[in-house]
Amino acid sequence: MAVVPPPNSQQEMRRRNLSRVLYAVAGAGPVSRAAIAARIGLTRASVSTLVEELLRAGFLVELGPGRSGGVGRPGNALSLTGMGPCGLGAEIGVDHLTVCAVDLAGQVRARSVEERPNGEAGPDSVLRRLSSLLDQVTGAAGAAGLRPAGLAVAVPGLVTRGSTTVARAPNLGWYETDLAAHLGAAVPGLPLTVENEANFGALAELWLGGEKGRTCPESAPLDFIHVSAEVGIGAGVVLDGELLRGTRGFAGELGHVPVQPDGPRCACGGSGCLEQYAGEAALLRAAGISVHGAGGRSAALARLRALADEGDEAALRALRRAGKALGIALTGAVNLLDPRAVLLGGALSGLAPWLLPALERELRGRAATQTSVPEVAVSAMGGDGPSLGAAHSVVRAVLDDPLPYAVAR
């Protein structure tokens, strides 16, 4: 008896193969049809059919003769279009807002930043200003021939899984805040994703930060913990190339891991949390540096780095204490999850020269075995990780299933 294929199996296979072609072009740069066929394991005839469909739909462009990947006359090189769908990524920080537009080739085509405290402004005011930045970036992207395919927003707090609701962002003073209710008019009809900023920073590392995991979903998976710090401290955990979110979406709250049970009271209600030792406010306070002078946090952190460079003992002592606390907090995660690397992002990345010695010493002294001590490195993304991860999450949604975003011909 003949086996009847499940409904839509051919359509699903076609969708998957179109996506594979796009990822192959994204991963290899300008590339011929023959090289794509060799890369993804389809026949040249099949790849040519898929490429023609993607050219008609406006996702690919031909650049002229390129290397064929075999004998014979070179074929025309293919590249992702610099026009058409793009991803909008936004970050809501404690003292800044960032919006960027990224095209299918991964290039940032428009960006706008506003430096201003958000902690006491309230969600209505902050999200009105974010809407204004979205208008600016959307306008600039439109002038370049791009149209947003979706918006993803990174926030410094807990986001309920599968929702657009910020359950708790204590450094902003936000509780049960639904961003869709505030941003719908700014991006009418666009899909909206809201995610913790450390998670988007981790995804930026996964997709953009290393040779593997850069764009091609078939590359080797990565396992790492991405530590992100601004006023608070969060962690994005990637295992086998997948982001660990947890049952409710609240995984990665590293800043509220207790490192000294009888330590100072934390805003979360606990005592001795990591943020009380390695958060920006705690670091600056321990070093005797005020955040209330000209330039705010940025100037204060620059002052901390300068004092550390000069060998100031109060600054070095504060940084050693922070590095030790980070090492203690991370030891539990390292022993539990066995990651290949720990990456420092956000404000911590600029302080790495003074944090890493104490951090690594704690990891070595507390790890289950010496062979399980992960590499500790500085994030390649710097402070741009959350907004880039957000924008690229939209781009990858297009690459995963391109036809809903096709140009009408």
Image (tube, rainbow, N blue to C red):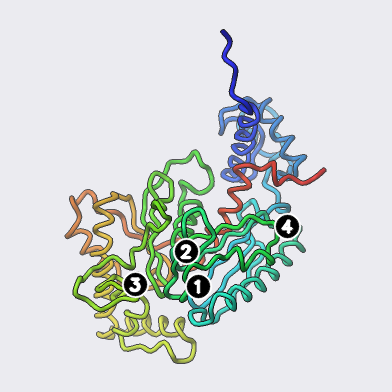
Name the one closer to the observer, 350 or 239: 239
Task: Identify the disc placed on residue 268.
Answer: 3
Q: Which residue is mark 2?
A: 197
Amino acid type, label 4: Leu
In the displayed structure, does residue 137 sit left or right of residue 345? right
Amino acid type, label 2: Glu
Q: Circles 3 and 2: CB distance less than 8 Å?
A: no
Q: Which residue is mark 4?
A: 146
Q: Indicate the quadrant containing the C terminus: top left, top right, bottom left or bottom right.
A: top right
Q: Indicate the quadrant containing the N terminus: top left, top right, bottom left or bottom right.
A: top right
Q: Circles 4 and 1: CB distance less than 8 Å?
A: no
Within 10 angstroms of label 3, few (less than 14), some, or many (20 or more) residues? few
Task: Identify the disc placed on residue 93.
Answer: 1
Looking at the image, tell me whether mark 4 or mark 1 is earlier in sequence order.
Answer: 1
Looking at the image, tell me whether mark 1 or mark 2 is earlier in sequence order.
Answer: 1
Real-space Cα separation, disc 1 to disc 2, in angstroms: 9 Å
Q: Circles 1 and 2: CB distance less than 8 Å?
A: yes
